[in-house]
Amino acid sequence: MTVASENGFSQLAERILASGDAYQAAALHPWLPMSERLVFEQIIFSHRRYPRLFAQASFSPVSLIERLVQESDGLILDKLAKNSATPTAVLRQLAEHSQNQSRFLSIAKHANADSVLLASLDAHDSAALHEAICNNPNTGLAQLSLLLATASSGERKAMARNPQANSGLLLALWQSSDDVYLQAEIAAHSECPPELLALAISNDQVLLRRKAAANPGLSKVQLAQLLGDCEAQVRTAALRHLGAKNIQLINEPARRVRRELARKTGLDKQLIESLSIDEDNWVRRWVARNPVTPEAILRVLAKDGEVEVRRGVARNALLPENLCRELATDPDSWVRAGIAIRPDLGVDTIRQLSCHDSIDVLAGLGRNPLTPVKLLMQIARHSDRDVRRAVILNPQTPLSILQILLEDPYPLNRAQLCRHAAVGSTQLLQLLEDPEPQVRFSAVQALAELSQSPE
Amino acid sequence: MKILVPIKQVGVLDEDFEIRDDGRDVDLDYLDFELNEWDDYSWEEALRLQEEFGDAVEIVPLAVGPEEAEEGLRKCLAKGGERGIRVWDDAMQGSDPMAVARVIAKVAEREQADMVFAGALASDHGFAQTGVSVAAQLGWSQVAVVSKLDYQPGDNSVKVNRELEGGLEEVLSVQTPAVLTIQLGINEPRYASLRGIKQAKAKPVEELSHGDLGLSDEDVGEAGSASRVRRMYLPEKGQAELIEGTPAEQAERLVEIINELKGVA
């Protein structure tokens, strides 16, 4: 049987009906014409455990969630209100047909609740609900402004964080209180009025200056002022938002600033050199990983006593081939593993790496699209489930090897197989018989997608 | 030699749950069932002995529970072993660990088992009594919370390790027959192969009632139990503080709490 046809899809549907398996029925649900869904829903609703399970599962298809909202079981409706996959329309239905405060709260916190729905929840007088509405990034500016008059301290801070807040609202919030934590949130907001940002930058409170340093709207002059701040946490925050060019901070006394600095790509050679011999190994490991670090410095760092620094060199995107070969023989397997996952490995380096039996190295090679088939075959038979899964996650693994892994004892590995491009309908049909529900669910999803793709 | 391994399908609480109308347990609607984690380890330990010594060791999983308990037995049999035993009837409803232990002890006698490997406790009720009570019923030696096991079939003693307070390790020699309750981490339980799972469906599971074991109605269920659940409830929330506010406020409060605990002014 092939599923890449209308006939194949019908056979799949018949097979799932005959199996009576709720997981397979749920996976096929969105692919079925409306007229055929009822019979599959009978399987899904055959035991009350399943509707509850699918109501809370983020993997549940939207079509099934739309069906579940018609149920009267309060537990199902509560779970739907919390499910991240629940779409806006279903949340609206839940809100319209409910008097349940905790369900309203779940909806107010939901990422799919839109501004209209959130505005409708506002009528319910509950502090927790109002705070959730103020926190929800979908809440409209008009609603936030309406809530301002009666807002608690927590709600005001949530408003100040809300991306929908504009400069007018932020100004009103600032003027409503002397609370430094509220002002700090306002100072960090991209819509913060310039006059408030200027106040924050020159404020005595470190918190205000630090949060202001994180504001993307800072001018070059303001940024320069904050980079010269006496507090390391302020300089770090400013540095984090500094562009890549013209970074000149030498003899920085604070470790946390130097660590941030070592990640920047706009460093000049002198600065990189000084950071590369920093006493703090976190600074050196970021220099090692920085793509602008010159080869001569990388060569020195490749012999660093700290494993993580050498690992940083191994993970450097622009690592020269000769250094790559050298680190492939590093005594520490974590460094070699960093090499094993590189997308630019030569045949000799792969061979060198394959001589070692470290799980990290073999997992890296297993996942690497450059690894030869013969070696992949060996790795696919490894006793460690994570190493075997690496082969499944490799997009270049041929079907001949994946076929061996259809019998993998670890269920997650078999579920991952369903998503591999080389796995076809023959293998997926075999996985329909799998004892693990998640494998059967994934297999049906993949088969249904195949049936919609051109032959 | 024969090792009997009692296993249990334990209830796993849903995120939200309700107590039954009689107030003595969680409403079944809010429970999923799975093999007790400790029993996964005790079965693995039995499997390892069988693999090491072949036909000299027979391992038998035993479940005391209704039909749903068979799922746990099949899960064990998918990894090894040739047969299982399930004991249940309506009169056994409400059995506490003492009453369950009475049943297990009778099966151990009937099977002429040489050892019983039980999980140190069950994750749902956590009595940690069943294994201990089986040893008492049988009059066998018993070691609780075993973290390492060294045994040769035919030996009249078994060497076991136990983890004690302060990282201490105790090594004991105990006479057989014995009941050992197994601690998590003694081994790394395997996953069943697909072939094993298929084969397990065909392996025989003997179904017995308490009468088949020579036990009376007074030996099992609530009548045969030494304890009775009077009430189950969620206590009121304690002294925990929910740290609220912006991330900066939360961090400051956390520092305050740490300093209070450290006695820093």
Image (tube, coloured by chain):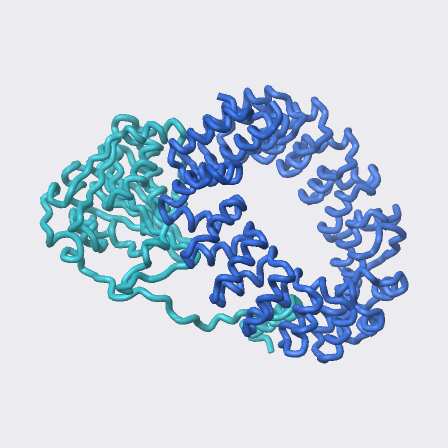
Chain colours: A blue, B cyan
Q: Is residue A210 visible?
A: no
Q: Left or right: where does residue A210 sit relative to residue A35?
A: right
Residue nearest the observer in this picture, B24 or B184 = B24
Position of residue A121 in the picture relative to residue B176 (left or right): right
- Which residue: 22% across, 32% down? B1
Identity of the residue drawn at 46% across and 34% down: A440
Residue A147 in sight here: yes
If the image is split into quadrants, where does the C terminus of chain A sit?
top right
Res. B63 image quadrant: top left
The residue that appears at 88% across and 50% down in the rendered structure is A245
Q: Position of residue B125 (x, y in %)?
A: 31, 56
Task: Tell me where residue A220 appears, x and y as whole percent.
Answer: 89, 61
> How many numbered discs?
0
Residue lying at the far front in this picture: please name it: A35
Is A40 left, or right, of A241 in this rendering? left
Q: Is residue A172 above or below residue B204?
A: below
Residue B55's spot in the image, x, y percent? 26, 26
Q: Is residue A180 above or below residue A448?
A: below
Q: Residue at x 84, y 47 (%)?
A: A273
**Nearer to us in this view, B247 or A286:** B247
Residue B3 screen position, x and y as percent: 25, 37
Which quadrant holds residue A92? bottom right
Judging depth in this view, the residue of A302 and A160 nearest the camera is A160
Say which of A53 and A213 sits in front: A53
